[in-house]
Image (tube, rainbow, N blue to C red):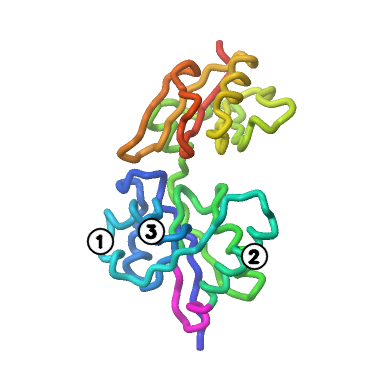
Amino acid sequence: MKKGIAYGVGVGPGDPELMTLKAIRLIRENDVIAVPGEHAKEAVAYQIAVKNVPELADKELVAVRMPMVKDRELIKREHKKGAKRLEAYLEQGKNVVYLTLGDPTIYCTFSYLQHILEADGYTVELVSGISSFCAAAARLNLPLAEWDEQLHIVPAVHKLKDPLTCPGSYVLMKSASHMKEVKELLRGNGMKASAVENCGMETEKIYQSVEEIPDDAGYFSLILARKAE
């Protein structure tokens, strides 16, 4: 029996209208849909996709636990467990469509499963979606880079020893829980910044300056910054 294909499908940052036609087609054409989390219908990726594909609610949904903890051994065990769940369907010749926020090539939970699936001999295909920082830049009406400017995508900037010293513009991700520290870094480096929280979602908030960004900004918060002129 021919094995199924595992698709890592980006559903965009939050606005259902930003889903690609290919993502919608793959969801419609396949019966097994996986999402990260404990409960499939509570996953943000599911909630975005079901608005475009209502029949998604009746498909076979697979919730894959992706713990956000520091215990690396626990994380590895859960990733292996999740990959094995998907492999059970692939062995039956069924394709699995794994839905993920944004784009599956950028800080994506599916990447961990992809490495395991490929090592185990299964075929994986990634389907690009609109990334959170591109969507945020569009919401702010800001070009990310022009001419020969550098663009730096920096996760957890609060952990870096010498951050924000390169020329060009910055995308700061995965630092919401340390927002107060990040704002101090921005001020200390003479940066001007804007931010979007929950981009494309009903709870979206836009902040036009460092001062406007709250210290308790939510998990899905992203900052665009550059040296003040």
Q: Nearer the viewer, residue 106 or 42?
A: 42
- Location of residue 150 (image quadrant): top right
2 or 1: tag closer to the N-terminus:
1
Percent across and percent down for residue 68 are 57, 50
Q: Please tell me whether residue 193 belongs to the stretch shown in magenta.
A: no
- Separation of marks 2 and 3 at Cα, in angstroms: 29 Å
Q: Is residue 229 left or right of residue 20?
A: right
Q: Which residues are magenta?
A: 88-97
3 or 1: tag closer to the N-terminus:
3
- In what element is the residue under mark 2? helix
- Separation of marks 3 and 1 at Cα, in angstroms: 14 Å
Q: Nearer the viewer, residue 116 or 146?
A: 116
143 to 95, vertically: above or below: above
Q: What residue does disc 1 label?
A: 54
Quadrant containing the C terminus in the rendered view: top right
Percent across and percent down for residue 38 are 46, 60
Percent across and percent down for residue 134 are 46, 37
227 to 201, vertically: above or below: above
Count of numbered marks: 3
> What residue is at 61 percent from the left and 59 percent from the top?
112
Percent across and percent down for residue 29 are 34, 70
- In what element is the residue under mark 1? helix
> What residue is at 69 percent from the left and 59 percent from the top?
73
> What residue is at 58 percent from the left and 17 percent from the top?
191
Residue type, numbered disc 2: Arg
Q: What residue does disc 3 label?
A: 23
Residue type, numbered disc 1: Pro
